[in-house]
Image (spheres, grey):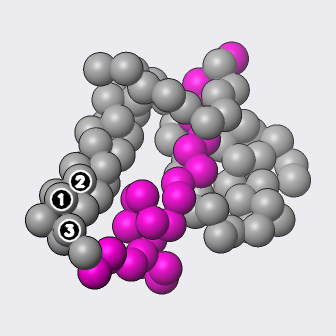
Amino acid sequence: MSVHVDVAFTAAKVAVFVDGCFWHRCPEHATMPKRNVEFWEPKLRRNVERDRIVDVALADAGWTVIRCWEHEAPSEVLPRIASALGRPC
């Protein structure tokens, strides 16, 4: 399985993903297209399923996985990253 991490802190083994609200089914902002639902529903469901598989695979390899949403302010995400890196924010 090929994994594309958005930001990787390799020495600390911290992987950060910035998930798009549409593509990764944000609980606040996800929408379903009205047309071609037979295509979109399984595609978007597979994206979320793949996210969970990647999370488990990275955790099993000793990585800390941080997922944030595209709508989150950097000031909300930075403390989580800093904590995972063992650094003050």
Contact check, label 2 and label 3, Cβ < 8 Å:
no
Q: Which residue is mark 1?
A: 39
Judged left or right of residue 64, residue 47 is: left
- Disc 1 secondary structure class: helix
Q: Which residue is mark 3?
A: 36
Q: Which mark is residue 86?
A: none
Q: Is residue 19 visible?
A: yes
Q: Of label 2 and label 3, which has the lower sequence position?
A: 3
Contact check, label 1 and label 2, Cβ < 8 Å:
yes
* Magenta-drawn stretch contains 18: yes
Report the mark closest to the observer, 1 or 2: 1
Residue located 19% across and 71% down the image? 37
Three-letter code, disc 3: Asn
- Measuring from the top left, give residue 3's x and y in whole percent: 42, 26
Three-letter code, disc 2: Lys
Please determine whether, in this image, residue 85 is positioned above or below residue 76.
above
Residue located 59% across and 50% down the image? 18
- Measuring from the top left, give residue 71's x and y in whole percent: 65, 70
Three-letter code, disc 1: Phe
The residue stretch that appears in magenta: 11-34
Judged left or right of residue 46, residue 32 is: right
Please determine whether, in this image, residue 82 is positioned above or below residue 13.
below
Contact check, label 3 and label 1, Cβ < 8 Å:
yes
**What is the quadrant of residue 61 in the picture?**
top left
Q: Which residue is mark 2?
A: 43
**What is the quadrant of residue 30 in the picture?**
bottom left
- Measuring from the top left, give residue 10's x and y in whole percent: 65, 19
Measure the C-alpha gap from mark 2 to mark 3.
Answer: 11 Å
